[in-house]
Image: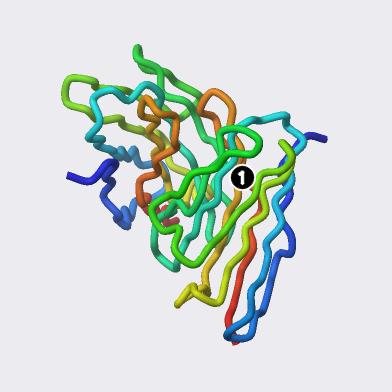
Amino acid sequence: DGGITQSPKYLFRKEGQNVTLSCEQNLNHDAMYWYRQDPGQGLRLIYYSQIVNDFQKGDIAEGYSVSREKKESFPLTVTSAQKNPTAFYLCASSRQGVAFFGQGTRLTVV
Amino acid sequence: RKEVEQDPGPFNVPEGATVAFNCTYSNSASQSFFWYRQDCRKEPKLLMSVYSSGNEDGRFTAQLNRASQYISLLIRDSKLSDSATYLCVVIPGYSTLTFGKGTMLLVSP
């Protein structure tokens, strides 16, 4: 089955640690995105990539980093510089505007 | 003006009611429009695309008004299972997906 997979589903991080969220898709989509969603809020764009080896900052990129070494993979690293990382993180891929989302990762800083 | 704006709601309606949401967008060059549905603590899922001439999928009707720069979603004969947050997505010319913050719908018995 084609789809987009995020892992882990839940992640707990100590303050000061970097963590990497995985996002893999087998839909052969060029475009991939990372969004952050806080309780009762909309989706805010962190980073996006339209093609392998290229990515662009979104609206809230500070404290995050990404890579796009393969078409299928777009991992997101939440660095210690991100002041308030506790949130629901959603990865998406798209073709011709239609986006498909992974099930999300809930990150909690403890 | 924000790129994409939606009334956050909640819209509280009884089962069987008809309810409509609007979503306004600021970029007149926007080319593609979609409605997504998001259940609590889940990922958004595509509900329907919005075509220039308007389109219908069962109880759902989507329309685009380019002159006034908004899209709409009409739900007829609301079901309890329609309770969710409805997100509009607008794609400007540079292809980044821009989401509205969503409109919450609560359908009660």
- Look at the picture and state if A21 lies above or below A57: below
Residue B101 pos. (x, y %): 36, 52
Q: Residue at x 23, y 46 (%)?
A: B2
Frontmost residue, A73 versus A27: A73
Residue B75 pos. (x, y %): 39, 35
Task: Report in which chain the residue with disc 1 lies.
Answer: A
Q: Secondary structure at mark 1?
A: strand
- Look at the picture and state if A81 lies above or below A45: below
Q: In the displayed structure, does residue A20 sit left or right of residue A65?
A: right
Quarter residue B77 falls in: top left
Q: Residue at x 17, y 26 (%)?
A: B68
Q: Residue furthest front?
A: A53
Quadrant holding the N terminus of chain B:
top left
Residue B74 pos. (x, y %): 35, 32
Q: Residue furthest top?
A: B53
Quarter residue B18 falls in: top left
Residue B89 pos. (x, y %): 41, 37
Classed neighbour count for the residue bearing mark 1: other residues with Cα under 10 Å, few (<14), some (14–19), many (≥20) = many
Quarter residue A32 falls in: top right
Residue named by callout 1: A101
Colour scheme: rainbow
Q: Residue at x 44, y 29 (%)?
A: B95
Quadrant holding the C terminus of chain B:
bottom left
Frontmost residue, A25 versus A42: A25
The count of marks equals 1
Q: Residue at x 74, y 60 (%)?
A: A7
Frontmost residue, A77 versus B56: A77
Q: Amino acid at mark 1?
A: Phe
